[in-house]
Each structure stands twice: as C-alpha cells, then as structure tokens.
Image (cartoon, rainbow, N blue to C red):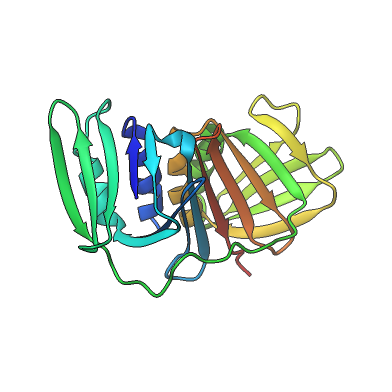
Amino acid sequence: MRAVFPQVKELKNLISATVAFLSEGTFKAIDDGIHLASLDPSNVAVIILDLYNNMFLDYEHEGEEIFTVNLEDVKKILTKAKAKEQIIWELDKEKNKFILSIKGKSTRKFVLPVIESEGGIMDIPSLNLPVQIEMDAKAFREIIDSAKVVADEVKFLADPNGPSFSIIAEGELKEMRIDLTPQDETVLSLEVPAKAMARYSVDYLYKLTKVATISDTVVIKFNTNMPVWFDYKLADRFKYSFILAPRE
C-alpha cells in the first residue's frame, strides 16, 4: 500500500480527532480508499474514518491490506509537517513496518511498527434514526462549547410541531437551550417526522467537534434513547463519522 496526500492539514485534523478516542487504529486499504471503523475502549462510541481516492495524489494497494498503527505516534509526526508538504503512507508487509514520510524541500522518513491487533475493522451497525439535521459545523461546535460550561450532558429534543431541534444543557443552577428551525441561517436542512429525545455526554461531543475545522457542515441523526450519528465530510475526499451511545 502506498498513499500520497497533497498536504497535511486535512489528515492532521482527522487523525487528531481520532486520537481523542483511539490510541491505535486499524486501517483497511481497498479499491475506493483507506478505511477505519473501531469501537472506543469504553464501548461508548464508534469512530469511522473513510479516506477516499480523491484524497490522494497517488494511491496503490495489493488486494485488501489491513494494518494497525499507533495513532499517537502518527499524530506527533504529522505535527512536524508544514502546511504545503506532502504526506506519504507506505506499508512494508515483509518487514511489518508502516512508513510515514514528509516530503518538502527534503524528505523525512519515519518508520513505525505495525501492531498486532485483535480488533480489526468492525461492522457498521444499522440504526433507525429518522430525525436528521444538517447544519454549520462551526455553529454546532460553539453550541457544545457553551454547553460544556453548564453540564456534563446535553439533551437532544426534536418536535415536528415547528419543526424544531433543540439542544439543552441543565446544571444544578445553570441552563442553556438552543432551538434550531429550518429558518435559521446555520441550518441547511431539518427532518423531524416524530418527537424524539435522548441524552449524550458533552465531553465526547466536545472532542468530536474538533473535526469542524476542516468540514463546513455536519449531519446529525438520532432517535429516542438511541445512539446519535454524526457525519462530517468534504465532497468526495473524506468522511468522518461518529456514533455515540445515549445516556440513560
């Protein structure tokens, strides 16, 4: 496997967001790109990262290639790259090594061990999540950032009479409520076929919203007392999905 990224910004932010939940990642290189799907150690969240062919300047692989690497190490190496430098991923199956190169005026090559992992690529669950909102990713990040100072969980509330999608944080003495409707500038689309309510961890959502720096919009899907599903994407280059279990 060999993949050449034209610049570091997108990849750096995607790996940083993933490292917030996973210390190591198992990737699968196939015809349409490189993919990761893993359950976090606390069994609360599923992280899905899809790097499509258009993400690369050059991409080649031999059949289905699966490899696991330390994401903390990858993140640290990517911080050494300048904005316009290319990033190259290579898999040396004979030596069981993962090679990460930073190519600018010169080429810096970092060799990491491929880790033995029992996790692999997990199957993506099929969920019935009829409530869906697509909104400005930075606006959602600001909402979660505000909720963090009020409480350790947020309530997602959907009401078809409006329709509206509300995010509520309730502390002992403080409260925050944001009501979103199709008329709001930050809302691109809103589908609320029925009432729904669920609670989720603010801490997990706060870590997730780091992806907002490289994706203009986020699609949020949920249902009563069901996991919430987030999709961040950039055209046909990448998609970062996150599934978070509800709080009781």
Q: Is residue 201 left or right of residue 22?
A: right
Looking at the image, the residue that sits furthest to the right is 161
Total numbered labels placed on residues in the image: 0
Residue 161 image position (x, y, % from top left): 87, 42
Looking at the image, the residue that sits furthest to the bottom is 118
Residue 124 image position (x, y, % from top left): 59, 62
Q: Is residue 230 visible?
A: yes
Looking at the image, the residue that sits furthest to the front is 62
For image coordinates 43% across by 71% down, the residue present is: 119
State which quarter of the image contains the C terminus. Answer: bottom right
Q: Is residue 10 visible?
A: no
For image coordinates 68% across by 31% down, the residue present is: 187
Residue 87 image position (x, y, % from top left): 28, 37
For image coordinates 50% across by 48% down, the residue present is: 31
Rendering quarter of residue 65: bottom left
Q: Nearer the viewer, residue 153 or 103?
A: 103
Rendering quarter of residue 77: top left
Q: Is residue 235 above or below residue 92?
A: above
Q: Is residue 187 left or right of residue 21?
A: right
For image coordinates 51% across by 37% down, the residue present is: 142
Q: Is residue 236 left or right of residue 51?
A: right
Q: Is residue 85 left or right of residue 226?
A: left
Residue 146 image position (x, y, % from top left): 50, 42
Q: Nearer the viewer, residue 37 or 161?
A: 37
